[in-house]
Image (cartoon, rainbow, N blue to C red):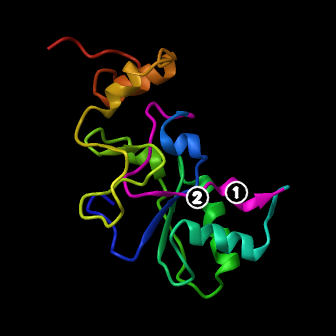
Amino acid sequence: LEQGLPRNEVLLDARPARRYAGEDLGPDPVGGHVPGAVNLPVGSLYADGRLREVETVRARFAEAGMGADTPVVVSCGSGITACQLALAHRQVFPGAPEPQLYAGSFSDWISDPRRPLAHGDQPGALPGGHHPAGREVRQGAGHAQDAVDRPGAQDPRRVRAAQRAQGRLVHGVRPPPQ
């Protein structure tokens, strides 16, 4: 993903809109999404634990910029919810290319603080990607620091996770000063 997606491929993020936008961190130490990912909350495809009508689900996929022939990579926070998105895709587009799963999803993406993050409700763009520019794409190191600097980031678990990502905390112990 760091080199971008092929021109016709779509990266879908199954998380709720607030997590995608970076307004709600969920279990992650930083918020936002993989630049280039299009938000399609999996909850919008289901009602009462069941997949909505086929035409409704197809319309939601179309709103996300894809049709039956569009190759798709599905993601979420850790790879679990994305599987529901892949299953919904297979149900409403039988015979279409099988969705690919970004198994680590956002949690894997943020494990390397050099990777860019996008915030807001627009996809942003990966290097070499084809998606329209988003409201904000942060390049380079530093997104781990956001987790410490954000309002409400004093949750000790998030601070430790951010410190771990910055190399300032290893297995719960701060490394000695250099």
**Residues at marks 2 and 1, CA–CA distance in whole angstroms:** 8 Å
Horizontal side of 178 relative to 52 (left or right) equals: left
- Magenta residues (range): 26-47
In terms of secondary structure, what is the magenta stretch mainly? loop
Q: On the image, which quarter does residue 10 sit in?
A: bottom left
In the image, residue 66 above or below residue 142: below
**Image marks 2 and 1: residues in contact by CB distance under 8 Å:** yes
> At numbered mark 1, what does the secondary structure look like: helix, strand or loop?
helix
Q: How many marks?
A: 2
Q: On the image, which quarter does residue 46 sit in?
A: bottom right
Q: Residue at x 65, y 76 (%)?
A: 90
Q: Which mark is residue 123?
A: none
140 part of magenta stretch:
no
The one of 33 and 121 positioned closer to us in this rendering = 121
Q: Which residue is mark 2?
A: 40
Residue ranking furthest to the top: 177
Q: Which mark is residue 44?
A: 1
